[in-house]
Amino acid sequence: MSLLILIKVEVKQNMATNRKYWKGLEELNETPEFLQQRDQEFMTNTNVEEFLGDEQLKETSTARRDFLKFLGFSVAAATVAACEAPVVKAVPYVNKPEDVIPGQATWYASTYYDGVSYANILVKTREGRPIFIKGNRDFGFTNGAVNPQVIGSVLSLYNGDRLKFATIDGVDTPTATVDDEIVRGLEGIKSKGGRVVLLSNTIASPSSYAAIEAFKNSLGGTNEEGVSSGATFEHIQYDAVSYSAIRKANETTIGKAIIPDYDFSKAKTIVSFGADFLSSWLLPTQFTPQYLVNRNPDNDWMSKHYQFESNMSITGSNADERFMIKPSEEAAVLAALINACGGNVSGIAGEVPSSVSPDAIATVANNLKAGNGLVVSGSNNVGIQSLVNKLNHVIGAYNSTININNPIHLYQSEDDKMTGLIKDITSGKAPDAVIF
């Protein structure tokens, strides 16, 4: 409600009416305070500290008008304070790059790989600073698909806790000094014919492999008599999430230690045993757009998806039918499906759980036998993966949905070598140097 007081005085003079309005009693009476404020170009603002520091404030009875005045001032003061921002001094280019226009974003095509997630991406930059990542729909086999890890990775570039210097025993040290000490240490190991181990996750970069090979050659060599000398070098690739069981099972069944290429876009029936291929299993950035191709109700047909798992996953929540089983029950369910599809497997310990009825086994098997079926498993057990391969062979998946001639080169974890390295360290036969 407005408290504006309008006082009207009518003066009749020469049959004309002149009207004058006042905004308040102060203007009408022309009080000294009003005259002082009227002659100032700008109004005097009351300091918040000065206002709140009045000791008699608690003893005063505030009128409604004064309360509204104080309330309006406090809101305005808080708004102005919230709009304050730190001053950032911009330094102009001396020689501006041709492809950089201040204020306009520049996009770069790139590839993201951190040992787990892989995607073809576009990076948005402003004045050389990456600020946003999205999928590249025009290049690469991921067809623009990304996951939260890929999108959020740009935040790590602005992490204030990142190391700014090299360290020795936790003490910041110039990088050149650290490099010199490492080189001297490696030269000493090389001279006595020691052992050097390089431990990394799976590397997908040809240039990185070339650098590792050059590093290996720098540690070895031959002496004047032509006898090889130098340090023994070993490169071990190890992934925290390993898929080595798939490679070992394929080495036994098809003679190639590979992870084949799975094409979910061709699959009419998908059976997954704990493989969360829409979120974290193997290559979700490739599998997700493939999976969505045949999950459109407007198509002539839709793929049928069955999920057998213990815990709810993103993939399981999107399945047509989901069955809860224990990891120890996967082998029994796989054996039942193999036998129902016309294969022959025996000697499998355990029974099909009650959560999977015989009718469900028969329904899944009939759909798989209809053609273009695909079975995957997230287990890192060689026995489970061998049963999956057998089931895929029975339903003819290697002729439709699985391509062994275009293998996935990621996840080359060498678990056996890693286990051997740990045994050497615990038994006192540790390498002379380990580089992570």
Image (cartoon, rainbow, N blue to C red):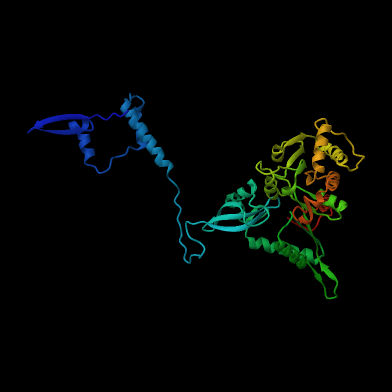
Q: Residue furthest left?
A: 14
**Left or right: 360, with 19 as reference point:** right
Quadrant where the N terminus is found in the figure: top left
Which sits in the foreground, 124 or 189? 124
Q: Tell me, yes or no, if residue 225 can be seen here.
A: yes
Which sits in the foreground, 363 or 71? 363
Q: How many marks?
A: 0
Residue at point 23%, 33% (across, down): 23
Placement of 91 over or under 392, stated as above or below: below
Q: Percent position (x, y) of residue 225?
A: 85, 75
Residue at point 75%, 65% (across, down): 213
Residue 299: quadrant of the picture: top right
Q: Percent position (x, y) of residue 339?
A: 88, 40
Q: Tell me, yes or no, if residue 30 can be seen here.
A: no
Quadrant where the C terminus is found in the figure: bottom right
Q: Percent position (x, y) of residue 22?
A: 20, 33
Which sits in the foreground, 129 or 225? 129
Placement of 223 over or under 209, stated as above or below: below
Q: Residue furthest front?
A: 300
Q: Residue furthest right?
A: 347
Residue at point 41%, 41% (across, down): 81
Placement of 175 over or under 86, stated as above or below: below
Placement of 382 over or under 198, stated as above or below: above
**Left or right: 154, with 392 as reference point:** left
Residue 197: quadrant of the picture: bottom right
Which sits in the foreground, 156 or 343? 343
Q: Percent position (x, y) of residue 47?
A: 35, 38
Residue at point 38%, 38% (across, down): 77
